[in-house]
Image (spheres, rainbow, N blue to C red):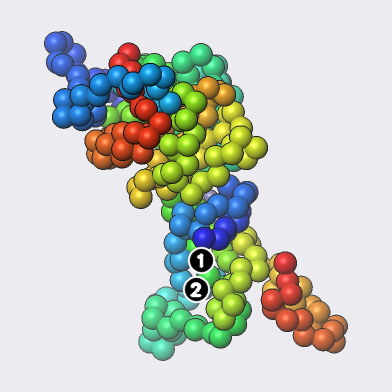
């Protein structure tokens, strides 16, 4: 058993209280009528399946029942960050900024 | 004044009300525990349960005027006064528990105070009930049934969480140092009653009727 930090309850709770709900930050085409079949199909049916960092939605199903975002490593299962809906991952932003500054690429497992 | 129609949902006249544990008690009449009971289980039947949804800005003042309780804004906390309690369930959701029979008057008074703001009040009194556990082994029985940390250090008085309990869901609350409360679904009452009798057998469990 492991713990997941719920950004709404603001504490770590048992994993069995949560459910995974798929890829996060999907953007619905702004003008669905003007979207091509390919754009609409991508939005509806196609999901990333990366080996490594993945941004996912999870729901605190047995607790506050709120959806939130998780940055998770699909290889090690390590959760690097949980953050509320409507926000962006600060860990991912810091990694990108670090790479732009030319810093050596940090191993994902080293992030608390 | 709110435009929402509110009506008296309690039947009037001589309609016998039966608690969700009615059949459980008939089927499992419990002999008093031999010697000192480690766990005492008591239902608090027919209480008024209202779910309040909205932002704290919208609800805070009106709720305080009607109930005398302050809306708890710290996650997983509750405020109680005598036989009333108000518990945080989510950033926009609270559970208000009041003495039996006050659904109609409270909802009317709340809607009068809150007017046409953006909020929701739902009477869930018929859908759930409160089970109280006390005694020296009450915490042990709960610990056997949930992965939630119930140590006094992480679960002090005034804390309440919605969590997984006995493979179903329940709200676990600690109104004071002596008592634990479970807020459970009506349809799970019999299952949980028998689960707790079984889990509490090793400590000696007895039920108390009020
Ligand atoms: Zn939560």
Q: Tell me the number on the disc at residue B74.
A: none
* Residue at mark 1: chain: A
Tell me whether the residue at label 2 lies in contact with that at label 1, contact meaning CB atoms closer than 8 angstroms.
Answer: yes
Q: Position of residue B165 (x, y in %)?
A: 40, 45
Q: Is residue B130 visible?
A: no
Image quadrant containing the C terminus of chain B: top left
Instruction: Identify the residue at horizontal 14%, vertical 15% (top origin).
Output: B15
Split into 4 quadrants, where in the image is the N terminus of chain B?
A: top left
Read off the residue under disc 1.
A57
Residue that sits furthest to the front in the current view: B35
Q: Mark 2: which secondary structure?
A: strand
**Position in image of residue A23 (x %, y %):** 49, 73
Q: Which residue is denoted by mark 2 in the rendering? A: A23
Q: Nearer the viewer, residue B186 or B131?
A: B131
Residue B183 in the image: x percent, y percent? 39, 33
Q: Chain of mark 2?
A: A
Q: Is residue B150 left or right of residue B104?
A: right
Residue B156 shown left or right of residue B135 in the figure:
right
Q: Going 14% across and 11% down the picture, which residue do you hit?
A: B14
Q: Quadrant of residue B203?
A: top left
Residue B67 pos. (x, y %): 50, 18
Is A34 left, or right, of B100 in this rendering? right
The answer to which quarter of the image holds residue B72 is top right
């Amino acid at each position: 058993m492991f713990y997941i930090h719920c950004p709404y309850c603001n504490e770590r709770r048992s994993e069995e209280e949560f459910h995974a709900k798929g890829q996060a930050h999907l953007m619905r085409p702004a003008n669905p009528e003007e979207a091509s079949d390919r754009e609409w199909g991508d939005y509806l049916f196609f999901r990333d399946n990366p080996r490594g960092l993945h941004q996912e939605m999870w729901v605190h199903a047995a607790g506050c029942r709120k959806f939130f975002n998780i940055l998770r490593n699909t290889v090690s299962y390590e959760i690097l960050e949980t953050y509320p809906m409507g926000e962006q991952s600060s860990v991912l932003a810091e990694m990108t900024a670090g790479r732009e500054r030319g810093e050596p690429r940090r191993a994902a497992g080293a992030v608390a | 004044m709110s435009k929402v129609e509110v009506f008296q949902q309690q039947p009037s006249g001589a309609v016998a009300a039966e608690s969700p544990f009615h059949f459980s008690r008939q089927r499992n009449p419990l002999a008093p525990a031999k010697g000192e009971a480690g766990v005492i289980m008591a239902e608090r039947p027919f209480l008024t349960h209202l779910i309040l949804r909205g932002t704290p800005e919208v609800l805070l003042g009106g709720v305080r005027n009607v109930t005398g309780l302050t809306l708890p804004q710290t996650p997983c906390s509750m405020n109680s006064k005598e036989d009333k309690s108000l518990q945080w369930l989510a950033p926009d959701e609270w559970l208000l528990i009041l003495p039996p029979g006050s659904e109609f008057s409270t909802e009317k008074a709340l809607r009068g105070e809150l007017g046409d703001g953006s909020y929701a009040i739902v009477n869930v009194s018929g859908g759930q009930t409160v089970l109280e556990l006390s005694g020296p082994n009450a915490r042990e029985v709960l610990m056997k049934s949930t992965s939630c940390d119930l140590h006094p250090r992480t679960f002090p008085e005034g804390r309440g969480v919605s969590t997984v309990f006995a493979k179903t869901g329940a709200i676990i609350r600690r109104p004071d140092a002596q008592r634990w409360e479970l807020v459970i679904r009506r349809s799970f009452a019999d299952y949980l009653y028998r689960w707790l009798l079984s889990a509490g057998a090793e400590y000696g469990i007895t039920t108390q009727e009020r």
